[in-house]
């Protein structure tokens, strides 16, 4: 690292967790600053910028740096700047920047949009990006890559340092770090691997759950492990799971072990308290989500327990590395599968770790929505020429292949919306002067941008406030809409009673009656890597490998053999069965979730064409399950080789997946606002439904840049069709279709999964017609609206029409509670 | 497209699946909450949403006019998203609208979004329109005499089916009054169980959900308890 620094080269340090990466990244800067200081006048201005994906990490690193710097008596100013930094300190940092500033991608983007960014960063010598592997390939990573390109322009001699965990594609990460998007212009430093981790699997006493991802059945065993160790981290996959696991552990906690909870919906103060208590060794265990995945060094953690399947080898190693943050000792970790599929998956993960294989996809191209936000931010900084900015952004790896035409379209979108229909000239955000330089229209546009900077699109949240007390955290607005006063839910490890709705918060009190609910949060689940999916398929298809599996799982697989059949290695098993008024069709493809997403689209489209009334589908890592109003009688007609020829474009465009993608893209690109100046409080009132905009734009300008970006992003999320083609070719003549009376043992875990996708064919209208006809039939036409409705409704005591008919028949009644009281779109 | 007959205050009316009301005896077509130029309203505030909403809404209107050929046209308020909306009409859209209105008797009922007469467009502007036994106004009033037709709330209803609830924009009627769905391309919706809607229909009524080819009709039970909540929360709810 020092050699690279001496040569002024950028560098990427790849090391397993716990290798002291962060300090290595800072060392050249500290030496440089120390030398400058001892040479005479201390260096003025910002020398090193450190960017971390987590605010907490920036704060923690600052703490860890300040101590040695103070001990060595170095005259180096180190400060953090995040969304939590108070306004007076921000102003001071702008006037007199510290030597080392620790920040996040969002705060950096904001700083670069300021007119004085040139002075602030002009002398920057080094930019350190921590946890690059967690940023590259995400929208936050796109944003940061663009910001780095700008930093290199403001400070041409800037050296970059990337710090990454071990990854499957180090060259791609090196390109991401490089100032010119070329991997060979970066010194790649690989730390040798530490001791291999010691992994085992914890199974519950007695029954092994069929489905679900919570893993609560194993909590007694987990608790026993906590008692036996000094300090543990219990990692879970979702915030809901964190709440439930925490509750379950405390119910078992006869020894009163100090066990804490840490997840992203708790208030910052609460999280800081837990982190501090952990660092001071006052806790025996903390139940945590991905909020503790990255970087923070806890010192003496001696075991990690992963509840629920790890979903990927890289992520598992990252979490396991939290235990024993030293390279020479083996980390101890236990996996707690939550259901039977996860038992197999955990076994597959342990195999993969042992064989030293890494998984993970290479980073995808940068999002055009992020580029739109960046262009506006750059205009807010200073006027620019399009040629110069294009040259600058294509030096960032995610945008290295960006076509000039796409750049110009994005620029036009930022300027005036980029619509074929004129009319928005007077509302334009940017204007061009005679020299072709682009200026921002006014301070209002800049203010609006700064309020909406960032690439994290969250579903609307509401604060949870204790009556007459403090704010406890946030839950998603839709969850609140399912509550009625008196309902209870679990939050922050306690049971809360929903009292009322304030303007900005949910008012709750402690305690309450009834079975508490658990708030769920959208988008908090990672897909299983295709690598692990393949290993799982191999284990199921090979009964010789079952010996390594626990008894209940072996029994489960055998039971599947009796109730239905086991999926064969080469063919395709398809099951059809009725459930809850619908027909489910489950295909055991084992191609991984991304391939199944595409397949779900194709199959439901085919079902629509066959008149089966498809309603939706679910793609898990193992199966694709579709449900329809009418049963599939011939599975071979669904999975034909020409399935890929289905006219999919309209079908996909109407899907919930595309609509969700568009909503995110439109928000990041600035078409939909998260916040509006002066209107912070009434966000909902100011929003317009993304769906409405999507439908209108699709009809009138289908090649609009945001629609192109939406399709491109969805296509990147869907796997290449070649893989599905191979599957279809392989299974022809080997499709085994079973029509069952009920769900099969192997289908159970899948049907309990979340993440259903809806399709909008003709099924909804058919179902409404059916429900309407049923009522009419049951009431012999008395409920039919034709003609008589007006009179009937006016008269509270309708005359009996036949001797047997008493009073007014009940209609289908009101919608289920969760459908009521819900604002679908902003109302104006 | 199959329209559904509805009797209101003794008059025979037809509800169209596109969200319009036709009164055959008067050859009159009624539409509510077009919110024309909502897109450009947002654009003026710095949100450059696609400007095609007016075009889209007018295309839907043109299809209805071809279907019914009405001699009288009533817009039930919030026809424009704001008072200056008509002045912002794109030249092409203005020409389309003038063409659609020409040769018909046009009434603009004023709404909360467009409390003044639309600029330079033909037709009379009225607070309310009383025609025979029917009364047309933008926002329905609890306790109005039978025969009230109103809009304002953009009602939507979710109906249970064997595969779960299906939600659509809808008409809502109880023999006393008719509440119309919003017709505009950029108009969202409010559940019919939301307190302000429930307050108009305390004894429930019948919802007509808009479908592709026809309407789907369902009885809606009494909503007194929901209406009561409306009174308790009076003032806190934002007007659509």
Image (cartoon, coloured by chain):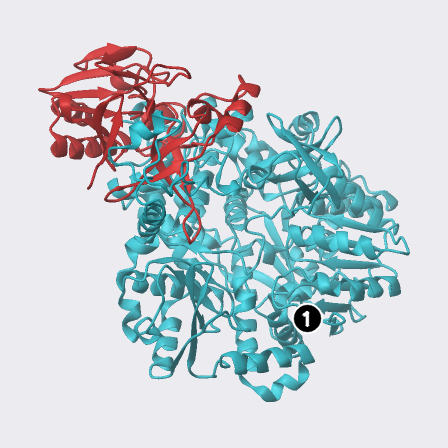
Chain colours: A cyan, B red
Question: Which percent across, then down, holds residue A129?
Answer: 62, 51
- Taking the view exactly as shown, the residue that stands out farthest to the right is A255
* Numbered disc 1: secondary structure: loop
Question: Which percent across, then down, holds residue A577?
Answer: 44, 69
Q: Is residue A494 left or right of residue A368?
A: right
The residue at 54%/60% (across/down) is: A753
Total labels drawn: 1
Q: Disc 1 is attached to a residue of which chain?
A: A
- Taking the view exactly as shown, the residue that stands out farthest to the front is A803
Determine whether A716 is above or below A154 in the image: below
Determine whether A282 is above or below A496 in the image: below
Nearer to us in this view, B188 or B217: B217
Question: Which percent across, then down, holds residue B25?
Answer: 14, 23
Is any part of residue A431 visible from this angle? no
Is any part of residue A530 visible from this angle? yes
The quadrant of the picture occupied by the N terminus of chain B is top left
Q: Is residue A89 left or right of residue A144?
A: right
Determine whether A773 is above or below B192 in the image: below
Q: Which residue is mark 1?
A: A208
Determine whether A131 is above or below A413 in the image: below
Question: Which percent across, then down, holds residue B123?
Answer: 18, 13
Nearer to us in this view, A147 or B107: B107
Crowdedness near tag 1: few (<14), some (14–19) or many (≥20) residues, C-alpha within 10 Å: many
Nearer to us in this view, B142 or A760: B142
Instruction: Indicate the quadrant where residue A84 lies.
Output: top right
Nearer to us in this view, A162 or A656: A656
């Amino acid at each position: 690292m020092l050699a690279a620094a001496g040569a002024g080269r950028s560098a990427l340090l790849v090391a397993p967790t716990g290798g002291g990466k962060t300090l290595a990244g800072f060392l050249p800067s500290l030496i440089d600053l120390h030398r400058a200081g001892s040479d005479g006048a201390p260096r003025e201005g910002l020398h090193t910028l450190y960017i971390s994906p987590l605010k907490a990490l920036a704060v923690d690193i600052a703490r860890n740096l300040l101590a040695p710097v103070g001990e060595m008596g170095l005259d180096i100013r180190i400060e953090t700047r995040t969304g939590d930094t108070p306004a007076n300190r921000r102003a001071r940092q702008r006037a007199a920047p510290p030597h080392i500033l620790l920040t996040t991608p969002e705060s950096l983007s904001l700083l670069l949009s300021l007119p004085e960014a040139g002075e602030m960063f002009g002398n920057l010598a080094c930019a350190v990006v921590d946890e690059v592997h967690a940023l590259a390939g995400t929208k936050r990573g796109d944003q940061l890559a663009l910001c780095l390109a700008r930093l290199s322009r403001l400070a041409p001699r800037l050296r970059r340092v990337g710090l990454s965990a071990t990854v499957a594609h180090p060259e791609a990460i090196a390109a991401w770090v490089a100032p010119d998007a070329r991997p060979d212009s970066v010194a790649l430093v690989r730390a040798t691997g530490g001791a291999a981790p010691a992994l085992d699997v914890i199974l519950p006493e007695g029954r092994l759950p069929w489905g679900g991802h919570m893993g609560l059945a194993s909590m007694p065993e987990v608790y026993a492990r906590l008692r036996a160790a000094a300090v543990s981290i219990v990692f879970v996959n979702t915030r809901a799971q964190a709440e439930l696991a925490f509750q379950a552990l405390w119910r078992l906690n006869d020894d009163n072990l100090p066990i804490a909870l840490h997840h992203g919906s708790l208030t910052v103060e609460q999280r800081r308290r837990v982190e501090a208590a952990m660092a001071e060794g006052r806790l025996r265990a903390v139940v945590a989500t991905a909020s503790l995945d990255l970087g923070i060094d806890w010192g003496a953690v001696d075991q990690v327990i992963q509840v629920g399947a790890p979903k990927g080898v890289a992520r598992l190693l990252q979490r396991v590395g939290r235990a024993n943050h030293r390279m020479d000792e083996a980390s101890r970790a236990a996996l707690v599968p939550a259901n039977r599929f996860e038992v197999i998956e955990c076994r597959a993960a342990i195999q993969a770790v042992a064989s030293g294989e890494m998984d993970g996809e290479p980073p995808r191209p940068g999002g055009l929505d992020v580029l739109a936000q960046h262009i506006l931010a750059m205009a807010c900084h200073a006027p620019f020429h399009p040629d110069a900015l294009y040259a600058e952004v294509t030096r960032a790896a995610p945008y290295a292949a960006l076509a000039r035409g796409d750049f110009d379209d994005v620029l036009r979108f930022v300027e005036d919306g980029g619509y074929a229909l004129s009319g928005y000239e007077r509302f334009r955000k940017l204007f061009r002067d005679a020299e072709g330089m682009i200026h921002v229209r006014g301070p209002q546009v800049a203010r609006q941008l700064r309020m909406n900077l960032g690439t994290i699109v969250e579903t609307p949240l509401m604060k949870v406030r204790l009556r007459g007390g403090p704010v406890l955290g946030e839950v998603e607005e839709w969850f609140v809409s399912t509550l009625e006063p008196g309902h209870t839910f679990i939050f922050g490890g306690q049971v809360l009673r929903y009292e009322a709705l304030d303007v900005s918060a949910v008012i709750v009190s402690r305690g309450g009656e009834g079975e508490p609910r658990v708030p769920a949060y959208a988008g908090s689940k990672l897909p299983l890597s295709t690598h692990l999916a393949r290993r799982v398929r191999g284990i199921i298809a090979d009964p010789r490998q079952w010996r390594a599996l626990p008894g209940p799982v072996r029994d489960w697989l055998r039971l599947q053999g009796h109730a239905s059949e086991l999926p064969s290695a080469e063919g395709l098993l398809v099951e059809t069965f009725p459930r809850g008024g619908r027909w489910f069709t489950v295909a055991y493809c084992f191609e991984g979730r991304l391939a199944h997403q595409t397949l779900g689209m194709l199959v439901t489209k085919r079902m629509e064409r066959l008149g089966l009334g498809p309603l939706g589908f679910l793609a898990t890592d193992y199966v694709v399950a579709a449900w329809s109003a009418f049963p599939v009688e011939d599975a071979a007609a669904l999975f034909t080789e020409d399935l890929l020829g289905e006219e999919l474009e309209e079908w996909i465009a109407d899907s919930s997946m595309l609509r969700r993608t568009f909503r995110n893209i439109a928000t990041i690109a600035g078409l939909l606002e998260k916040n509006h100046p002066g209107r912070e409080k009434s966000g909902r009132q100011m929003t317009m439904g993304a769906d409405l905009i999507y439908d209108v734009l699709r009809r009138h300008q289908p090649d609009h840049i945001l629609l192109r970006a939406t399709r491109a992003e969805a296509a990147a999320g869907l796997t290449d069709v070649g893989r599905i083609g191979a599957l279809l070719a392989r299974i022809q003549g080997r499709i085994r279709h079973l029509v069952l009376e009920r769900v099969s043992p192997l289908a159970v875990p899948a049907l309990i999964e979340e993440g259903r996708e809806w399709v909008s064919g003709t099924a909804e209208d058919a179902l409404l017609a059916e429900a309407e006809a049923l009522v009419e039939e049951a009431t012999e036409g008395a409920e039919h609206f034709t003609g008589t409705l007006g009179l009937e409704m006016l008269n509270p005591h309708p005359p009996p029409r036949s001797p047997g008919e008493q009073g007014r028949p009940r209609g289908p009644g009101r919608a289920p509670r969760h459908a009521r009281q819900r604002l679908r779109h902003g109302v104006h | 497209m199959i329209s559904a007959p509805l009797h209101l205050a003794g008059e025979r009316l037809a509800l169209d699946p596109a969200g319009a009301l036709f009164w055959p005896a008067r050859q009159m077509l009624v539409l509510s909450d077009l919110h024309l130029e909502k897109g450009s309203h947002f654009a003026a505030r710095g949100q450059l949403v696609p400007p095609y909403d007016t075009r889209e809404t007018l295309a839907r209107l043109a299809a209805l006019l071809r279907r019914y050929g009405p001699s009288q046209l009533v817009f039930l308020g919030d026809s424009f998203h704001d008072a200056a909306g008509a002045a912002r009409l794109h030249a092409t859209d203005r020409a389309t609208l003038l063409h659609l209105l020409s040769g018909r008797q046009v009434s603009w009922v004023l709404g909360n979004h467009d409390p003044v007469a639309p600029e330079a467009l033909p037709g009379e502007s009225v607070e309310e329109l009383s025609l025979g036994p029917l009364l047309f106004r933008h926002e329905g009033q609890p306790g109005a005499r039978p025969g009230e037709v109103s809009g304002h709330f953009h009602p939507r209803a979710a109906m249970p089916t064997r595969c779960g609830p299906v939600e659509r924009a809808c008409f809502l009627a109880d023999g006393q009054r008719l509440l119309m769905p919003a017709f505009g391309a950029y108009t969202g919706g409010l559940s019919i169980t939301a307190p302000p809607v429930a307050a108009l229909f305390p004894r429930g009524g019948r919802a007509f959900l808009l479908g592709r080819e026809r309407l789907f009709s369902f009885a809606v039970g009494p909503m007194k308890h929901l209406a009561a909540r409306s009174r308790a929360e009076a003032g806190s709810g934002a007007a659509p």
